Every structure is written in C-alpha cells, then in structure tokens.
Image: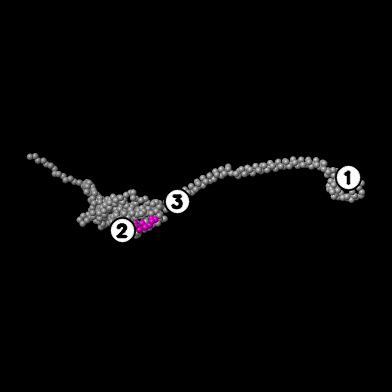
Amino acid sequence: MLEFDFPPLQPMVFTVTTLTNYLREVLETDEILRDVWVRGEISNFSQPRSGHLYFTLKDNEAQLRCVMWKGQTFRLRFNPKDGQSVEAHGAMSFYPAGGQVQLYVDEMQPVGEGQLYQEYLRLKARLAAEGLFAPELKRPLPQFPRHIGVITSASGAALQDILNTLRRRLPLARVTLAPTPVQGAEAPAGIVSAFQSLKTLPDLDLIILARGGGSIEDLWSFNDEAVAYAIRAAHVPVISGVGHETDFTIADFAADLRAPTPTAAAELATPITSADLAAELRNIQQNLALNLKNKLAILRQDLLLAENRLQRHSPAQRVRTYLQFQDETRERLERAMSHYLAQHQLKLQNQVARLESVSPLAVLRRGFAIVSDAQTHQLISRRSQTSPNQSIQIQLSDGKIAATISGDTP
C-alpha cells in the first residue's frame, strides 16, 4: 500500500480591504438590499456644514447607521429630528473606513405618510379620469390683473410673502383676502367657503390659493376632493402656490396654474410689473413723439406743396399782373395825353398868334381906339353917329375910358 505525504491544507486568508470590498459587493448586488424600505426611530441625528445627514435608525432590538447625501435632501418634505419615527428608502452598502454596514438613504418620510401618499395617488387618478385636470380646462391668466383674491391663513407667513411680492411688482393691484384655516379637519370646508365668498366679487380677475411648506399631513387639506371641485368652479383663473417646490397636491393639478411657492404664485399672477408698465409707457411716449414728428413733417411738406399749387392758381398773381398792366397803361395814357396836349397847345398858340394878328386889340396897341355909345354899346365909326353931350366909351389897348361929347357935332 502506497502512502503519500501531503502537506496540510492552508486556510484562505483575506486582507481587511479584500474582505470589506467583498462585503460591499455582496450588499450592493443583493436585489432586496438595493431597493429597501426601513422603518425606525431617528437617533444621533447630525447635519454638518457639508449638508449631508447622518443618523441611526433603531427599534427595540437593533439599530442601523444611515447616511443621506446633500443632493438627496431637497426631496425631504419635513425636518428630521431625534425621536421621530420615519420610513427610509435606500440601498445597503459597507463603509470600509468605519467598518460599518450603512443604509444610504435617497428618500424619507414620517411614519404614516406612505398610507396618505397612496390615498393621494388614488384620489388623483380618479379625478384625472373624471377630466378635472384636463389641459383644455386651464384658463389663461390676465396680463394685468386689477383685483386679486387670496385664499390663505390670515396669520401665516405665506400671506406676507404674497402681499410683499404684489406690493413690489404691481402696487396698483387691489388685493382681497378670503381668510381660511389651511391645516386641520376644518380647513377643506374653510377653503371651499373662501372660494364661495370670492364669487361675490364681480370685478375679481384672479385667485391665489396658497400655503407655506410642511409635511404631507400638514398639506393634506389641499388633497381634498371638495377643494379640487371648488377650484374648477371658480369664476376666474386660480393659481395654486402650496408648499415648497417639491410638494405636489391635488389642488396643484386642479388649478389653472401651479406655482412652486406662495411667492412664486404672486410673481406668476403679475406677469407685467410696474417697472414693465413704466418702460412700456416710455416706449409709447417715444413712439408717439416720433410719430408726431413724422406726421408734422409730412403735413409741413403737404402744406408747402399746397402753397405752391395755390400760388400757381391764385388770382393774386393775375391781380398783380393787372395792376402792373394798369400802371403801365396809365403811364402810356399820361404820356399820350401830355403829347396830345402839347400838340394842341402849340396849335392853340399858333391860332392865338394868328388871331392876335387880326385882333382889334393889336390895332389898339398901335394907337387906335374903339369908340362906342355908352348906352347902346354901338360902335361909332362916323362923326354923324354922335351928338352933343352923348356919353361914349373909348376902348384903348389897356382898358376903357368913359367920355362925353361936348360942343356941336358936324
């Protein structure tokens, strides 16, 4: 019989790194551990400056280390704290540096929220099937609302955020508050009543339904069927500004527009701000001034053309022509008259000279005289025509002389 001398089997020895890497691979490849929900109570909660969350989930018999990276925390709808019972979702892995199995959380909610969320999904699906969320039902928002209704708590921070935003963006807008509880059992009926009260305002242009952030229990009033129907029955468009950006409620889907926050709702309600209006008025003023300038230039050009046409057809030019013609005619007439008068004056002088040459006055100037009877003015050319004491008149060249015949006449 042959005997063999084999060396004893050596046990497999892992380094710590190799083993921890193997553990991490086992945990991360397990189908259940890659997608797991864990319920427990938070303890040893901390959030350093990095923004990551570190805590432990525990129950009466065990505890589990958990990490939630900063990039996942924005999805939280509540503020985690020690002693709070939560349901955390994530994947299991191994942290070699600390030698710990950890749950890397990507979603977390308070205990009980899961049932509420399922109820929310069922109501959303039913109302969607009824057509309550149909896109064709969405009403457009007014570009320049003059009267805005606000449905929210009178003491909440959401109201102040809305009022401050509206006052900053559009101080001309009138705001009417319809106060209502926004949390608790009486909140849904209060919200419906607020919508009814705003229906009595005929000049209302828009309604903002708002509330600050909170857990799903805090926002549950906005997941009410009656509230959804009240939104759709509103006589004006409705903006829903409920919770934070990650919060969605039935009211958001029923509203004509969903805003991520109350402040954003006020901004969406005022697409045109006072600054926009002022800029638009300046543009209108500039355009009016430019149009008026251009219009005046056109009218001035038309006026010049009309003046030119009027001058070409105006009787004033003809009148001036006639006046000039009249002046020239008058000058010609005056020259002709002067020439005519000069000719006739010359003729007259010639006639006068000829008349003077045969005039008795010329004879008288040569020393002759004309004797006539002073009574009968009969010329006396013979002596026989005289008698004693007869009054006679002697015509000389420079005048007449009265005389009386004395003595006897032959």
Residue 76 point in image, percent of width and height: 29, 53
Residue 383 point in image, percent of width and height: 89, 45
Q: Quadrant of residue 324?
A: top right
- Count the labels in the image: 3
Q: Nearer the viewer, residue 311 or 405?
A: 405
Q: Residue most toward the top? A: 2
What is the crowding at mark 1: few (fewer than 14 residues within 10 Å), some, or many (at least 20)?
few
Judge left or right: residue 162 versus residue 93. right
Q: Amino acid at mark 2?
A: Ala
Q: Nearer the viewer, residue 307 or 33?
A: 307
The span from disc 3 to disc 1 (Cα, nearest Å) is 126 Å
Q: Which mark is residue 382?
A: 1
Judge left or right: residue 166 versus residue 220. right
Which residue is label 3 attached to?
281
Residue 244 makes an appearance in the image: no
State the predominant SS element of the stretch in magenta: helix
Which is more foreground, mark 3 or mark 1?
Answer: 1
What is the crowding at mark 2: few (fewer than 14 residues within 10 Å), some, or many (at least 20)?
some
Q: Residue most toward the left? A: 1
- Identify the residue at image location x=45%, y=51%: 281
**What span is colored magenta in the figure?**
188-204
Q: Amino acid at mark 3?
A: Leu
Which residue is label 2 attached to?
189
Q: Quadrant of residue 86?
A: bottom left
Q: Amino acid at mark 1?
A: Arg
The span from disc 3 to disc 2 (Cα, nearest Å) is 44 Å
